[in-house]
Image: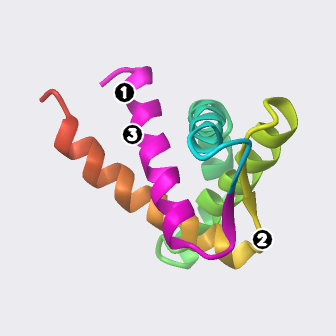
C-alpha cells in the first residue's frame, strides 16, 4: 500500500476517533478535518516519529512498550496543531487524555482497515 492508501486508511481512523472520543472534534468540515489531520500525521510518522522513538527508547524499555502510546499521542497532538494552523482544517483535541485514547483508537482502526485493504 502506497502513501495515498495509508493516508486514506489514517483518515478513516481519524474519523472513527472523532466519532468515539468525546474530547476530539473535527475542525473545517466533517471530512476535511480528518483528511487534513491524517495527511499531516502521515508526514510526521514518516519524518519525526523515528527520531522520537529513538529518544524515548529508554522509557519505552522501562515501561515495557507502554510509553510508545504516549509518543503516538504526542504526534497526534502535533498533527492536530499543525493541520489546524496550516490548512485551517483538522481535529481539535481537548486534553492529553483524549489524545491518548484517540491515538490508541487510530492505531487499532488503522491496523484493522489497513489489513483488510492490503494488497498482499
Give yes or no for residue 19 being in the magenta stretch. yes
Mark linked to residue 94: 2
Residue drawn where x is 28% and y is 42% of the image = 114
* Residue at horizontal 57 percent and vertical 77 percent from the top: 62
Q: Is residue 74 above or below residue 33?
A: below
Residue matched to label 3: 9
Q: Earlier in the sequence, mark 2 or mark 1?
A: 1
Please report the bounds of the magenta region as a residue range.
1-25
Query: How far across and how far down the image is residue 68, in percent?
Result: 55, 64
**Label 1 Cα crowd, 10 Å radius (few <14 / some 14-19 / many 20+):** few
Q: CA distance from mark 3 to mark 1?
A: 6 Å
76 or 64, nearer to the observer? 76
Residues at marks 3 and 1 touching, judged by CB atoms closer than 8 Å: yes
User: Which residue sits at x=67%, y=41%?
Assistant: 51
In the image: residue 76, left or right of residue 21 = right
Residue 59 in sight:
no
Give the prevailing secondary structure in the magenta stretch.
helix
Amino acid at each position: 500500500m502506497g502513501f495515498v492508501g495509508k493516508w486514506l486508511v489514517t483518515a478513516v481512523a481519524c474519523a472513527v476517533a472523532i466519532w468515539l472520543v468525546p474530547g476530539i472534534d473535527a475542525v473545517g468540515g466533517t471530512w476535511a478535518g480528518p483528511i487534513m489531520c491524517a495527511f499531516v500525521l502521515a508526514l510526521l510518522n514518516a519524518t519525526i516519529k523515528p527520531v522520537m522513538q529513538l529518544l524515548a527508547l529508554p522509557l519505552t524499555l522501562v515501561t515495557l512498550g507502554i510509553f510508545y502510546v504516549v509518543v503516538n499521542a504526542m504526534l497526534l497532538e502535533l498533527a492536530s496543531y499543525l493541520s489546524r494552523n496550516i490548512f485551517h482544517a483538522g481535529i481539535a483535541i481537548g486534553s492529553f487524555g483524549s489524545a491518548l485514547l484517540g491515538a490508541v483508537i487510530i492505531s487499532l482502526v488503522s491496523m484493522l482497515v489497513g489489513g483488510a485493504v492490503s494488497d498482499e
